[in-house]
Image (spheres, coloured by chain):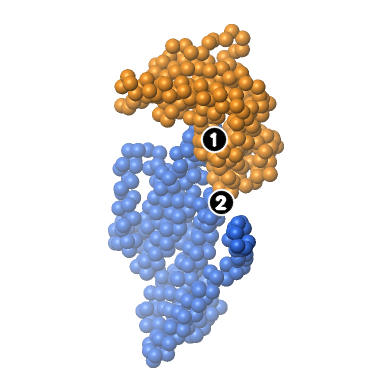
Chain colours: A orange, B blue
């Protein structure tokens, strides 16, 4: 099943063909997943818990090998998790500087670049704070700055805002959108929140659960900037949610 | 406590105000005064005991006078140089050995299966129990004393490092992985700093073992003519010199406490604070 039309225009940043992942001695996480993300695209993957979203991201990030199928990623990837996973012994700026250092940026340029990146996520004032002194939203911003410091071409995000309160999440949506515009980075964003997916993505791919496969794909051509409360966002979300429900009931009938 | 927001009540507005948080000096004092009081009580009890024993137990004043005498005569400094020298060399050697063993066990699962249990076993042996073995193998020498100090302290250091490595949160390993920290970079930027809080706790415990082992060693292994704290205790006992014994004991306790409470505890707190493990 190829739910995603292959566009002839823009180059492809991430492409998956017939991706299947069976955990050794465990369940089948993904079956025959096809995926195309254009360079500079913003694709959201939605699905219920256990639909193999995280497994898919791990395959795209190269952290795990597929059982069958192939993944092609043009350029370097980086991965953001639900928890910020900052090094607690380093300040916000030092966390970002470490990413720069591991990328080979010379020592003299690191501090300045780190501060620029923190400024990009509106955290320049907290550069010298340690992670435990920051709120959840601030930590996630630092993690975003650290990921951007890797200068990766593809930003893979695994439910990065799931643990945040609604107001902080809305603000981070705005910031992520702005950063995506500014940097032209390709984003693959995994979430279980359909509205969040519609708010952010150019393309929303619905995964069915156990095993995960692509159930449907939606192009989101709503004007930006969008807000999660926009009626158009709500309308499309409702359509996508009903698709998800159908999938779930189909699964229940067939099994 | 921050002040609570004003509660909207119908009858009258009630505002809750918290107390201002106590200043740093006041908090410092609240830690200091119980210790001062405890020390005073101990001194008083000692003095009472000495007064009632009819001269059997030396009181604080003669002991203090003796300490001053030994200090100015140069006998105490001479003993301290030997003992602290041994303590430093022995503890440092134990740290090196402990780190090497801990690192080896941490990275190799066969070693962990084989040696992991052995570390715990070695740690249960009281350091005095090593002396007969070590003396048979190494004859009474500086080496024998150091060997026992290392045997006492190194397992604690190794265990501290091992626990530290095991307790690094998996998400930090993942973050290091994603950032491309491999090999030596991973060790330097993820594993060692991640393990540090537990390693420092291991060092603290290692010091306590090292100091005990050293005192036991200096009592059991008399090296001809070298003065040391242990030798001073030994000599005082031989002369039936209770004042000298008490004076030496005061020094033993003072050094053990100083290193643990003042040096290691301070490092421990600094690390915990920086790692965000303290409030």
Give the label on residue A161, or none: 1
Position of residue A225 relative to residue B165, above or below, is above
Q: Residue furthest top?
A: A8
Position of residue B247 relative to residue B228, above or below, is below
Label 2: which secondary element: helix
Pointer 2 chain: B
Where residue B216 sits: x, y (%)? 37, 66
Q: Image quadrant for the N terminus of chain B?
A: bottom right
Give the label on residue B274, or none: 2
Q: Is residue B119 visible?
A: yes
Position of residue A47 relative to residue B113, above or below, is above
Question: To which quarter of the image does residue A143 belong?
Answer: top right
Count of marks, rendered view: 2
Residue nearest the observer in this picture, B158 or A124: A124
- Give the alpha-carbon distance from disc 2 to disc 1, as whole Å: 26 Å
Residue nearest the observer in this picture, A213 or B252: A213
Q: Is residue B155 left or right of residue A58?
A: left
Q: Is residue B178 visible?
A: no
């Amino acid at each position: 099943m190829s739910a995603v039309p292959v566009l002839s225009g823009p180059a492809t940043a991430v492409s998956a063909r017939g991706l299947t992942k069976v955990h050794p001695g465990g369940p089948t996480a993904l079956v025959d997943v096809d995926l195309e993300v254009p360079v500079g695209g913003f694709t959201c993957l939605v699905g219920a818990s256990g639909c193999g979203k995280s497994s898919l991201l791990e395959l795209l990030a190269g952290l795990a090998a597929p059982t069958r199928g192939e993944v092609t990623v043009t350029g370097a990837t980086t991965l953001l998790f639900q928890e910020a996973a900052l090094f607690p012994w380093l300040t916000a700026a030092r966390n970002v500087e470490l990413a720069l250092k591991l990328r080979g940026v010379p020592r003299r340029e690191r501090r300045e670049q780190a501060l620029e990146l923190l400024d990009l996520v509106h955290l320049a004032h907290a550069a010298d704070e340690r992670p435990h002194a920051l709120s959840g939203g601030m930590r996630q911003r630092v993690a975003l700055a650290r990921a951007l410091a890797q200068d990766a071409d593809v930003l893979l995000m695994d439910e990065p805002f799931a643990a945040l309160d609604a107001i902080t999440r809305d603000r981070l949506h705005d910031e992520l959108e702005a950063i995506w515009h500014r940097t032209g980075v390709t984003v693959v964003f995994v979430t279980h929140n359909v509205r969040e997916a519609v708010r952010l993505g150019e393309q929303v791919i619905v995964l069915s659960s156990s095993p995960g496969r692509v159930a449907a794909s939606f192009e989101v051509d709503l004007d930006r900037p969008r807000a999660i409360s926009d009626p158009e966002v709500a309308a499309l979300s409702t359509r996508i949610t009903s698709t998800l429900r159908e999938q779930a009931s189909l699964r229940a009938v067939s099994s | 406590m921050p002040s609570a927001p004003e509660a909207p009540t119908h009858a009258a507005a009630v505002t809750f105000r918290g107390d201002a948080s106590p200043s740093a000096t006041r908090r410092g004092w609240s830690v200091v005064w119980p210790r001062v009081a405890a020390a005073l009580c101990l001194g008083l009890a000692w003095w009472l005991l000495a007064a009632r024993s009819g001269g059997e137990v030396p009181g604080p004043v003669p002991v203090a006078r003796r300490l001053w005498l030994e200090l100015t005569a140069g006998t105490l400094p001479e003993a301290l140089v030997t003992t602290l020298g041994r303590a430093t060399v022995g503890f440092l050697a134990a740290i090196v050995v402990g780190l090497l063993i801990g690192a080896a066990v941490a990275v190799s699962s066969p070693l962990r299966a084989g040696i992991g249990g052995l570390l715990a076993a070695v740690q249960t042996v009281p350091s005095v129990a090593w002396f007969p073995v070590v003396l048979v193998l190494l004859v009474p020498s500086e080496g024998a004393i150091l060997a026992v100090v290392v045997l006492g302290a190194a397992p604690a250091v190794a265990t501290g490092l091992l626990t530290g490595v095991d307790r690094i949160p998996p998400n930090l390993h993942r973050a290091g992985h994603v950032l491309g920290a491999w090999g030596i970079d991973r060790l330097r930027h993820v594993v060692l700093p991640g393990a540090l809080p537990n390693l420092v706790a291991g060092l603290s415990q290692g010091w306590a073992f090292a100091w005990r082992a050293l005192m036991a060693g200096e009592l059991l292994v008399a090296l001809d003519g070298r003065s040391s704290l242990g030798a001073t205790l030994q000599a005082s006992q031989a002369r039936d010199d209770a004042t000298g014994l008490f004076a030496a004991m005061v020094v033993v306790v003072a050094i053990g406490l100083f290193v643990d409470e003042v040096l290691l505890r301070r490092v421990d707190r600094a690390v915990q604070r920086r790692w965000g493990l303290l409030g």
